[in-house]
Image (cartoon, rainbow, N blue to C red):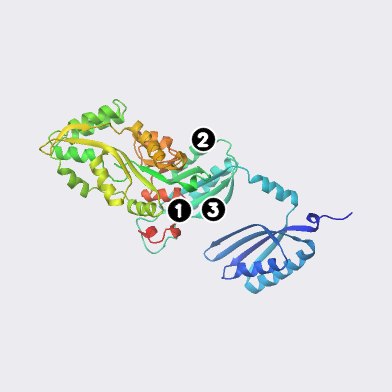
Amino acid sequence: MKETKAEQEELILIRITGQDRPGLTTAVMAILAHYNAHVLDIGQADIHSTLSLGILIRIDEKGAGQVMKELLFKATELGVNIGFSPVADNEYEDWVNEQGKNRYILTIIGRSLSARNIEGATRVITGQGVNIDSILRLTGRQSIRKSNQSVRACIEFSLRGTPKDYRQMQADLMQMSHEQGIDFSLQKDTMYRRMRRLICFDMDSTLIQTECIDELAKRAGVGKEVSEITEQAMRGEIDFKESFTRRVALLKGLDASVMEDIARTMPITEGVDRLMTVLKQCGYKIAILSGGFTYFGEYLQRKYGIDYVYANELEIDENNKLTGRYVGEIVDGKRKAELLKLIAQVEKVNLAQTIAVGDGANDLPMLSDAGLGIAFHAKPRVQATAEQNITTIGLDGVLYFLGFKDSYLGEAGRL
């Protein structure tokens, strides 16, 4: 009986390890090309100039022996190790069928990452029956001689499979995050993750490291009273609207000129300059959706080229004094979520392509509605609710959750 072409071919997995050098992959491929080998899969990693290259080929069985012979000679010439493993057709087909499974991206971030941190993450992954396809370092290499306060470490795991219990996986990662002082993001790896287009930020305690109403209250001599109302709201005794109205009323009579001085001295959050530079270079639309005040949002808008600002407008009388009232609709949590959807509609952006970043309870609705909601140095309640958290590094940590790698960012990445 005449054999089919498939029966006359072999599947061979080639594994090459050793010192990397220019031209190595070309030399290997030249041999495979000469024998008309079909490359079914290929993957390469390089760690400190140490190469690990895997190639799965399908080749006529008559040429298989000669290919392996020539590759062995070439490996000796290049000073690398090479190994061959036959792969059964059924084994390969099983692998092909695995490709239809769900894929996830797990990102872990810290000022540094230890073996304990990585072991913790992989233990959660393994416990959920999910396989690690690849591990990628997104941050640059850290110097062991030079100290750098803004240093950070980030590793991205590409995962394949369906977690046994997705919510439990999130909970286990959250617990590990709290216990070990690292951050994580678990996202389904869809086309939307790679095509985010709109990012909306809270302002106070997110883009800036202060609450503007507290700064105004200090200038008006009512800092203590405003803080007491804020604490009532945080305890859930009054809602945001009542809290906001009462606090603004205490600012009555304050000269509006103090806002300029507050704006000029606002402490910008670590990483904001780098983040904004990269987002603008990459064409993201950027919005501030704040329960704070328009004056300060517009100051940041001019500084960073932000596209949209929605915040609360303080009423000012003819003598340039605050009246203790506000103008228009209050931007509370519900309004932030509405604005996120409205801007996405105006920009013709799918909601799955949106990002929201904030720290307070009034940010939860937009964090929930956005394609990617990130709690940044957030209050405990927000951290417990949000699926993605950044607590260990600056706001530019958002870039790693978007899949950016330091080496891709050029000059902006070194700001």
Q: CA distance from mark 1 to mark 2?
A: 26 Å
Q: Are marks 3 and 1 in contact (CB under 8 Å)?
A: no
Residue drawn 39% across the image and 40% down it: 346
Residue that carries the numbered disc 2 in the rendered image:
167
Q: Mark 1 or mark 2, which has the lower sequence index?
A: 2
Q: Give residue 168's position: percent from left, percent from top.
A: 52, 35
Which secondary structure, mark 2?
Answer: helix
Farthest residue to the top: give it.
237
Q: Nearer the viewer, mark 1 or mark 2?
A: 1
Quarter of the image where one finds residue 412: bottom left
Q: Tell me which amino acid carries mark 3.
A: Ile
Q: In the rendered image of this protein, does residue 162 appear above or below residue 235?
A: below
In this rendered view, identify the residue nearer to me: 12 or 178. Answer: 12
Farthest residue to the left: give it.
319
Q: Give residue 13's position: percent from left, percent from top.
A: 69, 58
Residue drawn 39% across the image and 33% down it: 365
| Image position of 194 (left or right of 80) | left
| Image position of 184 (left or right of 334) | right
Residue that carries the numbered disc 1 in the rendered image:
404
Q: Specify the quadrant that holds the N terminus.
A: bottom right
Q: Tell me which amino acid carries mark 1.
A: Phe
Q: Residues within 10 Å of mark 2 (few under 14, many from 20)?
A: few
Q: Does residue 381 appear anywhere in the picture? A: no
Q: Tell me which amino acid carries mark 2.
A: Arg
Q: Nearer the viewer, mark 3 or mark 1?
A: 1
Q: Are marks 1 and 2 in contact (CB under 8 Å)?
A: no
Residue that carries the numbered disc 3 in the rendered image:
135
Q: Give residue 415's position: percent from left, percent from top.
A: 35, 58
Q: Residues within 10 Å of mark 3 (few under 14, many from 20)?
A: some
